[in-house]
Amino acid sequence: MSGYDPEEPPVQEPPWVLPSPNIPTPDTAVVYAGTGLIESLNISEGRGTTTPFLWFGAPFITEEHVDQLLETLRAAELPGVLYRPMFATPTTSKHAGVFCGGLQAARHRCRRLRARPHRHPRDRRAAAHGGGGRLARGR
């Protein structure tokens, strides 16, 4: 194609087509692949919230636990991702109808290609394991 350079970043993002109702954004698609690492735990992976797979939480995660989780995840220095506190009440799936504390992952647009989706859930799981002691397998 005339004027096409594969090394140049796209001028405009192509329109997003949802592959699933639970994958509403490109950011969700990036982290989805690694989210299976926390699905077997009693922590919601965000289904039933406005940020599926970008948020994780549970009723037993308090504000104090959120602060501990943030500290642990920030120390991991994960490239291309920020975590911020988020409290939500999932409408479906785990903890439906129950107010939950947790964290939301947000990627830096400027570092889009550096995010490693398989690493973030692993580190979230490790942080949750050490951040309150109430983590258990199962739903």
Image: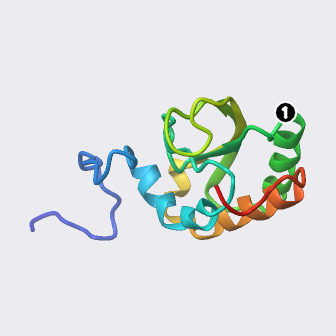
Dividing the picture into quadrants, the one containing residue 39 is: bottom right
Q: Residues within 10 Å of mark 1 (few under 14, many from 20)?
A: some
Which corner quadrant holds the C terminus?
bottom right
Judging depth in this view, the residue of 120 and 138 nearest the camera is: 138
- Where is residue 24 drawn, in percent x and y? 37, 44
Using residue 77 as the reference point, say whether residue 117 is left or right of it. left
| Amino acid type indicated by mark 1 | Glu
Give the residue displayed 62% in from the left and 48% down from the top: 44
Determine whether 10 is above or below 36 in the image.
above
Determine whether 2 is above or below 29 in the image.
below
- Where is residue 15 drawn, in percent x and y? 24, 45
Determine whether 113 is above or below 46 in the image.
below
Judging depth in this view, the residue of 6 and 104 nearest the camera is: 104
- Where is residue 88 drawn, in percent x and y? 63, 30
Determine whether 45 is above or below 116 in the image.
above
Looking at this view, name the residue that lies furthest to the front.
Answer: 139
* Residue that mark 1 sits on: 63
Give the residue displayed 85% in from the left and 55% down from the top: 72
Judging depth in this view, the residue of 59 and 138 nearest the camera is: 138
Which corner quadrant holds the N terminus?
bottom left
Q: How many marks?
A: 1
Judging depth in this view, the residue of 7 and 94 nearest the camera is: 94
Give the residue displayed 34% in from the left and 70% down from the top: 7
Specify whether residue 15 is in view. Answer: yes
